[in-house]
Image (cartoon, rainbow, N blue to C red):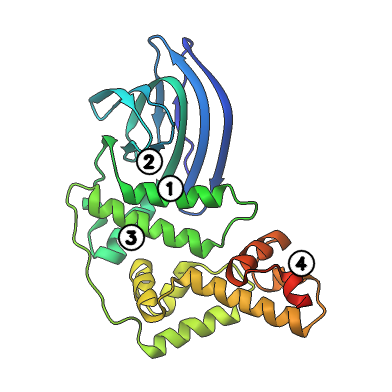
Amino acid sequence: MSNPIVTTPQNVTSQPQWNVTQQWEQLFIRHCRHSCSFVTGEQKWNFQDEHNLVLLLSPRPFHFAHRQDKRTCAGLYSKGDLLITPADTTLFTQTDGDVQIVQIRIQDSFVRNVAEETLGKNSERVELMPKFQTRDPQIEAMATMLLGELHQESFSSQLYVDSLANVLAVHLLRQHTTTRPQLPIYNGGLPQRQLMQVLDYMDAHLDRDIKLADLAQLVDMSQFHFCRLFKQSLHLSPYQYLLQQRVERAKQLLKQTDQSIIDIAFDCGFNSHSHLSRRFRQLTGMTPKAYRAS
């Protein structure tokens, strides 16, 4: 991930109240709130190799002005408004009010790879469009899911984040580029042989942080199409199936061994006792300790 070029002028005052961030392979996410007032100054942002998405979450409208790609927009912004700044585009902002945002940065190279693998499109022709005060329910929903992971005590597996990153990249390609390519349609799910190959791999690696790229490579297809066909086959996403199998393995170990719950958590691919307990309760309605005692 690149570090942005950020310039804050002397006549801008800002009081950050909280700032929570997390970086994954393809994505960076930041959730922050701050009070800011301005007179004439601007902040300057430039992300050289990442597309920058900012979703406004402030409960009250606030005044926001920004310039990018020789265009200027100013006015009252409210919850749900979205700002998209393509990679290598300079953004100037001025803000006045109590501001709460979620910022998502996604690698340009990753989006271009998705364009070639999923859409069969020459990535050199992919051009993301700057967007000002726009609305996008799909991006808002994905931002909400990523926020849920950001504020969890234990983060979900890489497979979950990989899946969201692919969906986000394809959505940007379909809805926010100059060409808006059509997505090929695949029906019928994975062939049985390929499905069993994937399931066997997942079962053998439950204790590891499985990546979506690993699964898609097994059947030689793009990550996005693999997710779609997998769900058609089992009516579960790859991450949902993996989570289900990890909980099933934990149930077996809880009943058949005297291993500690923390050891069982690690053996089943969870990264803490609390991570196992939270997911276990979601699927079974009880804690691992209560299940072992029942």
Q: Residues within 10 Å of mark 4 (few under 14, many from 20)?
A: some
Q: Are marks 1 and 2 in contact (CB under 8 Å)?
A: yes
Which label sits in the foreground, 4 or 2? 4
Q: Which residue is mark 4?
A: 262
Find numbered disc 3 in the image and state the secondary structure of the residue it sits on.
Answer: helix
Identify residue for label 3. Answer: 114
Nearer the N terminus, badge 3 or badge 1?
Answer: 3
Residue topped by disc 1: 143
Q: Who is closer to the viewer here, 48 or 204?
A: 204
Left or right position of 255 against 103: right
Using the numbered discs, state the Cα–Cα distance from disc 3 to disc 2 in whole angstroms. Answer: 18 Å
At x 40%, y 24%, the residue is: 44
Q: Earlier in the sequence, mark 1 or mark 2?
A: 2
Mark 4 or mark 2, earlier in chain: 2
The residue that label 2 is drawn on is 53
- Residue nearest the viewer, comparing 175 with 63: 63
Residue 214 position in % (x across, y down): 48, 72
What is the spatial separation of the Cα atoms under label 4 and label 2, in whole angstroms?
Answer: 38 Å
Give, as a three-letter code, the residue at label 2. Leu
Name the image quarter holding residue 41.
top left
**With 281 as the anchor, is 173 left or right in this view?**
left
